[in-house]
Amino acid sequence: MEVKKITSLIIEPTNTCNLRCTFCFVTEGMTREGGFMEFDLFKKIIDDSPDLEHLCMHNWGEPLLHKDIFRMIEYAKNKGVNYVVMNTNGTLLTNKMIDRIVDSKLDIIRFSIDGSAETFKRVRGVELQNIEQNINKLKKVKEKRRPKLKMGVVFTVEEDTEGDAEDYITHWEKIVDHVRLQPKLITSPRTEVCPEPFGKDYGKLVVLWDGRVIPCCVDYNANLMIGSVQNETVPNLWENEKMDLLREQHLKGEFPDTCANCNECASNKAEKRFFINALTE
């Protein structure tokens, strides 16, 4: 299988969150220490990745909790990163935060909104109405001041919430630029190769808040750590022996434990992301 050039990163500003969503491993399962990435470490990552084109400023945790999040975004854009994307739970959209988002160099902001208001309350523990009002407020402000900022929503679909999908799409397509549905992560045996070690659309790695690097965002406890940007560069880590071994294991179907039990719930509404047939999406 072709190993694509690494041009994308997921950077975890923090793995702490102000919510305790029912399906999230931050709520239950994550045992690694919580913390916030230092700005100097972020600078090193960007400086050491001259071919970086696409940057996701989120992983596990709520990125808007980081005091330097907009400083980080500005640094990456000034260094030539084409697209900077951030996912947020939307609970921190005060008027001041809306202004900071619009005035930033962020290209795309996505909100994690799961199904109907009833579903959202059940899985995230907060009311959707206020968040939606603030999303609409952000839309009005950005259309006046920076219409190039794109907005989207992401729905993590479970077996018992996929019935919300059609109404969800109809509703949110009127508000945001794009609507994404993705299946919930579950623990069950893997039977197919994952595209992540090779690069799905492009090569990509995940840098955790403390500098450790992992091959996939699903590895929430960093069991597959391939190195650290504290003393290495992302391009070199993409080509190191641990990554080569992981690729070989996947091609042989001899998956390491973290990968062996990585799966996504089956849904007619959302395509799986971490399987080889996803390469044709």
Image (spheres, rainbow, N blue to C red):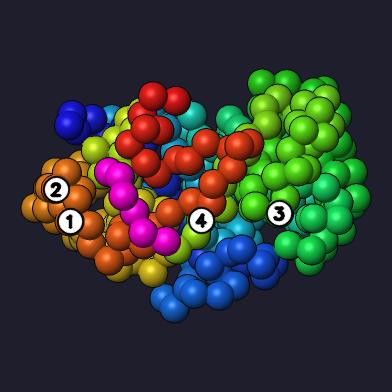
| Up-down relation of residue 252 to residue 145 (above or below) | below
Residue at image mark 1 = 254
Q: Position of residue 144 (x, y in %)?
A: 82, 23
* Residue 185, label in figure: 4
Residue type at tag 1:
Glu
**Which label's residue is closer to the chain start, 4 or 1?**
4
Q: Is residue 261 left or right of residue 242?
A: right
- Local SS, label 4: strand
Q: CA distance from mark 2 to mark 4?
A: 23 Å
Camera-side mark, 4 or 1: 1
Camera-side mark, 2 or 4: 2
Residue at image mark 3 = 160
When asked about the image quadrant of residue 63, the answer is: bottom right
Quarter of the image containing the C terminus?
Answer: top left
Q: CA distance from mark 3 to mark 2?
A: 34 Å
Characterize the local packing of mark 3: few (<14), some (14-19) or many (20 or more) Cα atoms within 10 angstroms.
Answer: few
Residue at image mark 2 = 252
Q: CA distance from mark 1 to mark 2?
A: 5 Å
Q: Nearer the viewer, residue 277 or 105?
A: 277
Q: Which segment did they paint magenta?
A: 188-193
Q: Nearer the viewer, residue 57 or 202?
A: 202
- Local SS, label 2: helix
Residue type at tag 3:
Asp
Residue type at tag 4:
Leu
* Residue 100, label in figure: none
